[in-house]
Image (tube, rainbow, N blue to C red):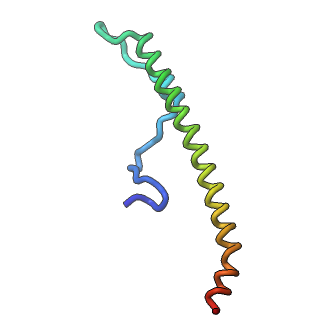
């Protein structure tokens, strides 16, 4: 089962960072891939991955802001709800 509020991942899971994608090197073989093409592709993947992480950070901040606003609203409503329950 996934942990509360999270996604299940194996203990060996490690998120990949843009710098890891950019620094990844491959063995060159006689009939290997074009190194410039591989490098351009890895840069593109790293840029997109960086954008995803930035959006994830913004989303987490927005979620925290909304949760905080909801908690404050619920706290402000609690006294009036108790009054209604007494009636």
* Residue 74 horizontal/vertical position (percent): 65, 71
* Residue 61 horizontal/vertical position (percent): 63, 49
Toward the viewer: 55 or 39?
55
Image height of 85 relative to 57, above or below? below
**At 38% across and 50% down in the image, what residue appears?**
10
User: Based on the displayed image, in which of its 4 quarters is residue 41 positioned?
Assistant: top left
User: Based on the displayed image, in which of its 4 quarters is residue 33 positioned?
Assistant: top left
Image height of 57 relative to 22, above or below? below
Rendered-image quadrant of the N terminus: bottom left
* Residue 35 horizontal/vertical position (percent): 41, 11
Toward the viewer: 7 or 58?
58
**At 41% across and 16% down in the image, what residue appears?**
38
Q: Residue furthest left?
A: 31
* Residue 28 horizontal/vertical position (percent): 36, 12
| Horizontal side, residue 82 vs residue 6: left or right | right
Rendered-image quadrant of the C terminus: bottom right
Image height of 45 relative to 15, above or below? above
User: Based on the displayed image, in which of its 4 quarters is residue 57 positioned?
Assistant: top right
**At 43% across and 53% down in the image, what residue appears?**
7
Q: Residue furthest top?
A: 30
């Amino acid at each position: 089962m996934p942990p509360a509020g999270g996604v299940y991942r194996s203990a060996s899971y490690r998120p990949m960072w843009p710098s890891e994608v950019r620094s990844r090197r491959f063995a060159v073989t006689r009939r290997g891939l074009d190194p410039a093409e591989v490098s351009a592709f890895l840069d593109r993947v790293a840029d997109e991955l960086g954008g995803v992480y930035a959006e994830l950070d913004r989303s987490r901040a927005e979620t925290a802001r909304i949760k905080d606003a909801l908690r404050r609203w619920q706290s402000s409503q609690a006294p009036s709800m108790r009054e209604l329950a007494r009636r």
